[in-house]
Amino acid sequence: MSTTVQVVFYSMYGHIYKMAEAVAEGARAAGAEVELYRVPELVPDDVLEQFGAKQAQTAFAHVPVIQPDQLAEADAVIFGTPTRFGMMCAQMRNFLDMTGGLWAQGKLIGKVGSVFTSTGTQHGGQETTITSFHTTLLHQGMVIVGVPYSEQGLTKMDEITGGAPYGAGTLAGADGSRLPSENELSIARFQGRHVADIAGRLKAGS
C-alpha cells in the first residue's frame, strides 16, 4: 500500500499555498499519494477584501476545506501556517482545537507530523512558530519530522532565505510582495520527500 500524505495549510496571500504545492511535489516524488487541503477561514469576506486578500485567495479556492476527522486517514500530515506574533495563525489554531475527538480516541498516535511556515521578516518567528506548533502534535502522539542538514539549502549564506532544521519557511516581506525563492521551494520539496519517506518506512514496519 502506498503512503498517504496530507498537506494542510492556511494561506492569506498565497505564500504558504506556493510552499504547500512544493511540499506536495516533494512527497509525490517519494511515491506518496498526496492530498492538499486548506483549513476554514475565520476572517469575514469584507475584511479580506479590504486587505486585498480575497483576490489572492482565488488562486487556491479550488483546494477543499478539510474536516478534522479526515486527519486520521493519512499516514503523515504536513501543516503549513503563516506566523502571527511568533506562533501559528488563528485559523490553524482554531482547526487544531477541533481535533479533540481525534485526541480522545488516539487516532493520530504514531502518524508523522511536520510543519512549514512564512514570516514577513528574517527574524519574524519562523522557528518559534514551528516549534510551538510541535506541542500540539506531541499531545496528539504524532512523530515529528523536520528538515535535516542533508538539505544543503539550509546552509546557504549568499542570499536571504527562510528554512530551518525545524521545517521549511519563506520570507514574504513586510508588505507581502516577496514570493518564495527557489531555495525556499527546494527546502519545501525536500521536506515533503523526507516526511513521505519516513512515513513509508514506519508504515512498512508496522
Image: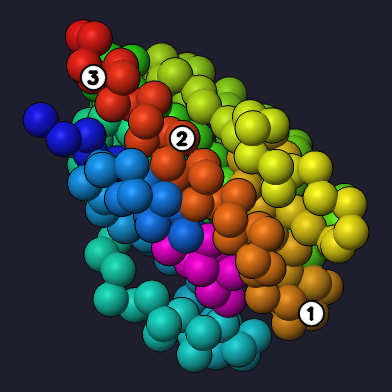
Q: Give the overall secondary structure of the magenta segment.
A: helix
Q: Position of residue 4 (x, y in %)?
A: 23, 39
Q: Secondary structure at mark 3?
A: helix
Neighbour class for label 3 at 10 Å: few (<14), some, many (≥20)?
Answer: some
Residue 128, picture quadrant: top right
Q: Which residue has dot 2 on it?
A: 194
Q: Is residue 7 visible?
A: no
Instruction: Please say whether residue 3 is one of the residues in the magenta stretch.
Output: no
Q: Which residue has dot 3 on it?
A: 203
Q: Secondary structure at mark 1?
A: loop
Q: First in sequence: mark 3 or mark 1?
A: 1
Q: Which residue has dot 1 on it?
A: 175
Hey, what amino acid is under mark 2? His
Cα gap from disc 2 to disc 3, whole angstroms: 14 Å
* Residue placed most toward the observer, 19 or 51: 19
Q: Which residues are magenta?
A: 11-21
Compared across the picture, whether 84 is left or right of 202 comes to right
Cα gap from disc 3 to disc 1, whole angstroms: 43 Å
- Judge depth for marks 3 and 1 and give the one in front: 3
Give yes or no for contact between labels 1 and 2 (Cβ–Cβ under 8 Å): no
- Judge depth for marks 1 and 2 and give the one in front: 2
Compared across the picture, whether 87 is left or right of 204 comes to right
Hey, what amino acid is under mark 3? Lys
* Relative vertical location of residue 36 with respect to residue 33 in this rendering, above or below: below
